[in-house]
């Protein structure tokens, strides 16, 4: 079964610090890797995404690092803020269709 | 406003009853999805539909059924055969345009079965 393994399960970071969430996958046919952010009681929303031909993508304080040979990708949140406290999901898309496989999620809490 | 609506936000049912969750989108998306979210397990795909009148089972389809009679609507029925139906259910949609992969999610329905 296709899987995406996400770690850590939960994370506490001080305001202004760097939050790092990691994901690993097995299926080399995955061709799109998004990160979603979910606030309590809400649906997830796309935060940032990367294709495997790129090693890094940055949007504001959010950066995805992608290591194709290791089959790993990570989300870095720079200057973490209390408003970033949410659950973050990594995901991966197979080469056909738009079906996504999600990681188990990371609950981030940024302490002020 | 374009988006996905799910209703109701909270739903309570007695064990043994079937229940239907509503999902409507006005984004003109061809593809729609149903996910189940449980603590610590991420989002698991129940059913998905790439086009009207067609749908496929996801990873955990047992005890669920869907229909796709209209492009805008993709209702999910949780049947009495679903052994553990209490969960947060999320509907999503995406365009079927090459290079466009983002899934847009609705606000979810929290179902409690007692």
Image: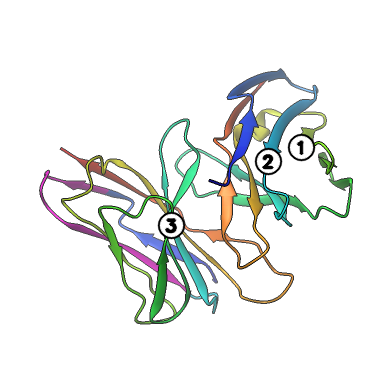
The residue at 58%/55% (across/down) is: A100
Q: Which residue is mark 1?
A: A72
Mark 3: few, some, or many residues within 10 Å (few <14, many ≥20)?
Answer: some
Kindly identify which chain the residue marked by label 1 belongs to. A
The correct choice, above or below, for B59 with respect to B101 in the image is above
**Contact (CB < 8 A) between labels 1 and 2?**
yes
Q: Which residue is mark 3?
A: B58
User: Mark 3 to mark 1: distance in Å?
Assistant: 25 Å
Left or right: B11 as drawn, with respect to A71: left
Considering the numbered disc 2 on the image, is that residue within a helix, a strand or a loop?
Answer: strand
Query: Could you say where residue A86 lies in the image, as x and y percent from the top left?
Result: 59, 34
> SS at mark 3?
loop
Q: Are marks 1 and 2 on the same chain?
A: yes
- The CA distance from mark 2 to mark 3 is 19 Å
* Residue designated by label 2: A25
Q: Position of residue B36 (x, y in %)?
A: 40, 47
Give me the residue at 79% from left, 33% from top: A76
Residue A73 appears left or right of B71 = right
Does the magenta-highlighted stretch encompass residue A28?
no
Magenta region, main secondary structure: strand
Q: Chain of mark 2?
A: A
Magenta range is B11-25
């Amino acid at each position: 079964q296709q899987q995406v393994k996400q770690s850590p399960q939960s994370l506490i970071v001080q305001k202004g610090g760097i939050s790092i969430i990691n994901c690993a996958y097995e299926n080399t046919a995955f061709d799109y890797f998004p990160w979603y952010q979910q606030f309590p009681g809400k649906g997830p929303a796309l935060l940032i995404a990367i294709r495997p031909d790129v090693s890094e993508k940055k949007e504001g304080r959010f950066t995805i690092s992608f290591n194709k040979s290791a089959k790993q990708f990570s989300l870095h949140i720079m200057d973490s803020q209390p408003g970033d406290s949410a659950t973050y999901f990594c995901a991966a898309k197979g080469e056909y269709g738009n079906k996504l496989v999600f990681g188990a999620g990371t609950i981030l809490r940024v302490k002020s | 406003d374009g988006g996905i609506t799910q209703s109701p936000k909270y739903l309570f049912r007695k064990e043994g009853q079937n229940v239907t969750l509503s999902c409507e989108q006005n984004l003109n998306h061809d593809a729609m999805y149903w996910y189940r979210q449980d603590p610590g397990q991420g989002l698991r795909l129940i059913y998905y539909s790439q086009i009207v009148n067609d749908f496929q089972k996801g990873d955990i389809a047992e005890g669920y059924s869907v229909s796709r009679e209209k492009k805008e609507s993709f209702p999910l029925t949780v049947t009495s055969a679903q052994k553990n139906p209490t969960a947060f259910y999320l509907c999503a949609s995406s365009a079927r345009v090459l290079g466009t992969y983002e899934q847009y999610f609705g606000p979810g329905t929290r179902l409690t079965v007692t």
